[in-house]
Image (cartoon, rainbow, N blue to C red):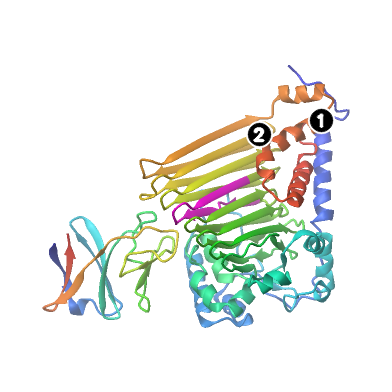
């Protein structure tokens, strides 16, 4: 497990996101109402980008911008079709003023 | 070997005569239109944020549905017209009435339905069919359902069969949980449009263990010129239940185009069975662009029986997601493309769980320069071990001017999947015709017999009344087809 610094806490206020590349994997890091969550930036339906979709802070879900599948940021599971397979999620935390992402 | 010439007229002339009669028949039987004098509301042509808000306001909807509609409108406006299938570039989305209310409410007695509308459904034989062999009927005229009734014994068993607007009012929690869970607003351009302006359609809920022995039927009728009909249907069959839903549709013959764009979502809970049958017979000035998707949970079965005879262009690929172990999906598709028609149809089945089984049978017939396209997907996803599937698509071309295309996609991510695929394209053969003619049939009867034999495997899956109707419609389309 390796820690990667995403940005400072101030750079990711509530409702914001950062998309970072770690070891060749694109990952979306979200601040959902104060909760930090990280999800693979890939829709399992057609492998298109996911993390730039609309964030719903009331449910901590992101909507795939290509075909509308809604993904749970906590579990990586799609809540609506056409995607049905989960995508990867990653542990993320705030530490010493920085946001740290753990990737295997 | 040449078939003997049995026609006394010049064959081309005979064909033109016969085709003229087909249109005559559609016009008298289905293609008439009613006056609009009693209409409650007819929105001016065109689509706007204001119109979407008005529809929601008019229906007195909860705030979440209004927001859903408005977001869907943004998705629609942001999406280009798809270029991968049939040609949709001629649709003028500004030249459509998106919402037309012909009566005040969905009545439970035909006597309360406005007279012109009741007469229309009488001519179409709906009340008669309801008396004879249906468990419930919903009749949609323009944007809204004008009549809805379900048999008392089913109601007592908890079966809900209401129009979608009533479903939202009376079962908001269920609707909110499942609405757009299979087909999100941004799934595709036409689903986005439907999500923005949807009106009417059916809401069906069948409680656990309840078997609805007779079919439920919905009938969709467009009357106005340049009309857009956007019904929305959600069917939930709870554990171990069983339901058969049938839809039919017709419209008047106009020289300008109308648009029908429905969204249909089916949820079959563990052990449940849903069969959804469509006999699509829109007039040839209707674009029919429909998104249909089903989810089958463990041991559940979903069957789409999809017959496309009418419309100018149809694009429709009913799909089934087999999400639970041993779920089963079947798609039976018939497409008949005559002059000026493009039937771009097919089906999709996605195996997402172990031991799931499926089949797709598609039969298409093209004549008089018509074009039939089969477009299908069979996917066995990772984790769907021991999946079994069979895909068969056959096309029959009745003349050299007609066209048939097949676009089958098969994706398999499991090593032990058992998947078969067969495809055939055949021309109606002179030898077959000659053989039948030597047994006393004339050329037209012989070709009808060949076509009937070709589609028989699908037709035999229909309830008897619909099989008869489908055969009759196909015979009508076939008349005079051999020059």
Q: Is residue B75 shown left or right of residue B439?
A: left
Tag 2, which secondary structure? strand
Q: Tag 2, which chain? A: B
Q: Secondary structure at mark 1?
A: helix
Q: Quadrant of the N terminus of chain B?
A: top right
Residue bearing mark 1: B11
Residue identified by numbered label 2: B397
Would residue B324 be counted in the magenta stretch? yes
> Image point 76% across, 39% down: which residue?
B478
| Residues rendered magenta in the picture | B313-333
Write the residue at 72% across / 75% down. B106
Q: Look at the magenta stretch and give its main secondary structure.
A: strand
Q: Are marks 2 and 1 on the same chain?
A: yes
- Chain to which the residue tagged by mark 1 belongs: B
Query: Could you say which quadrant of the image residue B11 lies in?
Result: top right
Position of A65 compared to B189: left or right?
A: left
Q: Residue A100 versus residue B35: which sits nearer the camera?
A: A100
């Amino acid at each position: 497990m390796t820690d990667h610094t995403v940005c400072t806490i101030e750079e990711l206020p509530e409702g914001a996101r950062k998309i970072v590349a770690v070891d060749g994997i694109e990952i979306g890091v979200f601040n959902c109402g104060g909760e930090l969550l990280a999800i693979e930036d890939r829709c399992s339906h057609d492998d298109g980008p996911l993390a730039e979709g609309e964030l719903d802070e009331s449910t901590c879900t992101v909507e795939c911008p290509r075909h509308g599948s809604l993904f749970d940021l906590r579990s990586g599971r799609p809540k609506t079709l056409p995607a049905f397979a989960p995508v990867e999620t990653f542990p993320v935390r705030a530490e010493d003023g920085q946001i740290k992402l753990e990737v295997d | 070997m040449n078939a003997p010439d049995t026609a006394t007229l010049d064959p081309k002339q005979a064909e033109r005569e016969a085709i003229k009669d087909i249109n005559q028949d559609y016009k008298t039987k289905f293609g008439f239109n009613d006056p609009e004098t009693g209409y409650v509301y007819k929105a001016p042509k065109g689509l706007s944020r204001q119109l979407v808000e008005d529809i929601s306001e008019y229906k007195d909807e909860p705030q979440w549905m209004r927001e859903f509609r408005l977001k869907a409108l943004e998705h629609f406006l942001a999406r280009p017209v798809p270029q991968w299938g049939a040609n949709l570039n001629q649709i003028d989305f500004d030249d459509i009435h998106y919402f037309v209310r012909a009566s005040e409410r969905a009545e439970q007695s035909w006597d309360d339905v406005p007279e012109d509308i009741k007469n229309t459904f009488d001519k179409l034989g709906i009340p008669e069919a309801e008396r004879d062999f249906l468990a419930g009927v919903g009749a949609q005229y323009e944007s809204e359902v004008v009549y809805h009734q379900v048999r008392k014994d089913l109601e007592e068993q908890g079966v809900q069969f209401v129009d979608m607007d009533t479903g939202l009012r009376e079962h908001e929690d269920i609707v909110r949980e499942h609405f757009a869970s299979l087909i999100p607003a941004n799934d595709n351009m036409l689903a986005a449009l439907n999500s923005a302006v949807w009106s009417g359609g059916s809401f069906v809920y069948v409680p656990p263990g309840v078997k609805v022995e007779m079919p439920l039927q919905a009938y969709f009728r467009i009357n106005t010129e340049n009309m857009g009909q956007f019904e929305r249907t959600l069917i939930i069959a709870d554990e171990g239940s069983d339901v058969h839903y049938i839809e039919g549709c017709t419209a008047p013959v106009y020289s300008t185009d109308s648009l029908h764009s429905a969204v249909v979502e089916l949820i079959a809970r563990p052990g449940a069975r849903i069969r959804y049958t469509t006999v699509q017979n829109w007039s040839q000035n209707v674009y029919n662009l429909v998104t249909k998707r089903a989810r089958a949970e463990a041991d559940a079965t979903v069957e789409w029986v999809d017959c496309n005879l009418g419309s100018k262009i149809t694009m429709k690929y009913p799909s089934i997601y087999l999400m639970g172990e041993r779920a089963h999906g079947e798609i039976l598709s018939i497409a008949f493309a005559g002059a000026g028609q493009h039937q771009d149809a097919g089906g999709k089945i996605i195996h997402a769980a172990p031991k799931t089984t499926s089949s797709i049978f598609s039969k298409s017939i093209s004549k008089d320069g018509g074009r039939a396209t089969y477009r299908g997907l069979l996917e066995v996803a990772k984790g769907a071990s021991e999946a079994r599937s069979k895909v068969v698509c056959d096309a029959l071309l009745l003349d050299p001017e007609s066209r048939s295309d097949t676009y089958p996609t098969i994706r398999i991510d499991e090593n032990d999947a058992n998947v078969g695929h067969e495809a055939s394209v055949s021309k109606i053969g002179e030898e077959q015709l000659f053989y039948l003619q030597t047994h006393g049939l004339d050329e037209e009867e012989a070709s009808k017999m060949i076509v009937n034999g070709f589609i028989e495997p699908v037709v035999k899956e229909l309830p008897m009344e619909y099989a008869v109707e489908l055969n009759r419609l196909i015979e009508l389309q076939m008349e005079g087809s051999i020059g």
